[in-house]
Image (cartoon, rainbow, N blue to C red):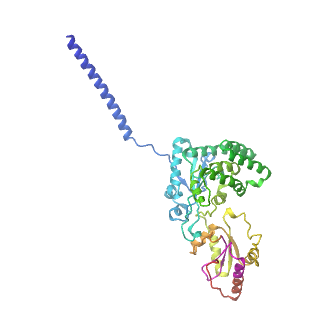
Amino acid sequence: MGYSRGQNLILLGCTMRLSWLLAVFIVQGLAWYSILCAEPPKAPKLDWQAAFTVLSAENQASKLVLMLVTNDDAFHEVQAAANGPKPDAAQLTDPTRHGWCAAEFHHTCQRILTLRPDLEDKISLQSVVAGTPSELSGGKTDDSPKRVVLFVCDSTYHLLALSIGIPSANDLLTLIEDAQEVKTLRELNETTPDQTTNAIVQRNETRLGRLWKMKLQQIVEAKKQDDALHLLYKLFSALQPTYNYDVQTRFGLTTELDARRLVILEQHSESRYAWCQAITPFIIGLDIQHDWNFFVELLWQQCAVAAGSDQTDFLTWFDEQKKTGPFVMAVTPPSHVQHLPWPPAEVPKSRRGTSWQTTHDSANEFPFRTITTQQLTALVRQRELKPITFFSPSMVRYLLLSPNNRLPQVIREQDPPARFWGLLRRAKAFEKSGLHPIQKEEIR
């Protein structure tokens, strides 16, 4: 009897154990089924807006604008639709229409919002596509490496933080937090902006190595003696030697051929991180809507031409002048060479006779207008002129146009000024006679 009872107890124990295991198996199976069948978490919604959109009053005080500026051709068919006067919603929300790195940057922003969902209603993604268009590169696609600048702005498009290159998720989160801190500092020190500058200098010093700390202090001291140092060109010039030495040390760049490699390295924010930390204290509050073009041209040392501007008035003026007689247009150079005086004050020893100043004065006797590279691009596109190679063999300075001649004469910086002066004299003589000279496309 005892033996039979023991067997029954063993059987009962096995049955209970099997029942427990079966229950655990069923629970685990249901859990895995619920996980597999459940929908994946939705990515935070983050749409692109047109550049420099007037933001709504809702959350405006806490709004941050992440403005991506790339050197893609703004008139390329992929970019043109999103940068046109009235892009539709689908065009704006498609990251591929906002520059070569927009899709990657959009994904990084979504990762940030996953970590910080409180930022979802406080961020506006915008972009400016502004490279050298084919109209200014001889009809060819610009083959220079891709570039990008990220401006972090407040709701009125004043600069709060800066990155050259695409930041990682952690770096972008730091950049956003920096911008929030600077925004608070500017509000607290509205009447004493120097206190904001000093606070940012102290913060950024902790992030820099010895070389860049020394440069930052040099700029602080120089700024006390020269208020004009806040000008962008002076800041760029002051920082460039230190940056050159820094990248040569870090990346082993030694020859001019390494310049292209450096541009590629600058696609990641780490390359110019120290440079950004050094310049940021002195450009906080920069009006990006007004000055973004000046900044990126200084940085990239090339034309930065965006699409979407209305050039109707300029083109109407051009058409009217074309009917009445010869006229001259002077082209404003990109910002990285605007500090060079034109006409040049000194005449090279190798050149005698007519100076550029004399020629410039003669050109002003005709109907005369100064135009930007953006207007020049619009002129080539809208009036179907032959594309111009803007910087080669030297930079374009003037265009001379006459009635009944479709192609303008392009006068370049290294052309002999006497030849241009001779063309102006002939144009005036033919204007008086009612005849028109045979047109050549360009002076070489």
Of 239 and 309, the residue lying toward us = 239
Say whether residue 155 is visible. Answer: no
Residue furthest out toward the top: 1
Image position of 401 with respect to 119: above or below: below
Residue 335 location in percent, x, y?
68, 62
Asked if residue 407 lies in the magenta stretch, the reply is yes
Image position of 262 with respect to 416: above or below: above
Q: Residue shown at 53%/54% (left/top)?
A: 102
* Image quadrant assignment for residue 21: top left
Asked if residue 401 lies in the magenta stretch, the reply is yes
Say whether residue 116 is visible. Answer: yes
From the image, which quarter does the C terminus lie in? bottom right
From the image, which quarter does the N terminus lie in? top left
Residue 269 location in percent, x, y?
59, 50
Residue 67 location in percent, x, y?
59, 53
Residue 328 location in percent, x, y?
68, 76
Which segment is the magenta one?
395-424
Image position of 365 with respect to 435: above or below: above
Of 242 and 231, the residue lying toward us = 242
- The image shows a total of numbered marks equal to 0
Of 281 and 345, the residue lying toward us = 345
Instruction: Describe residue 220's horizontal placement relative to residue 87 as left or right.
Output: right
* Image quadrant assignment for residue 131: bottom right
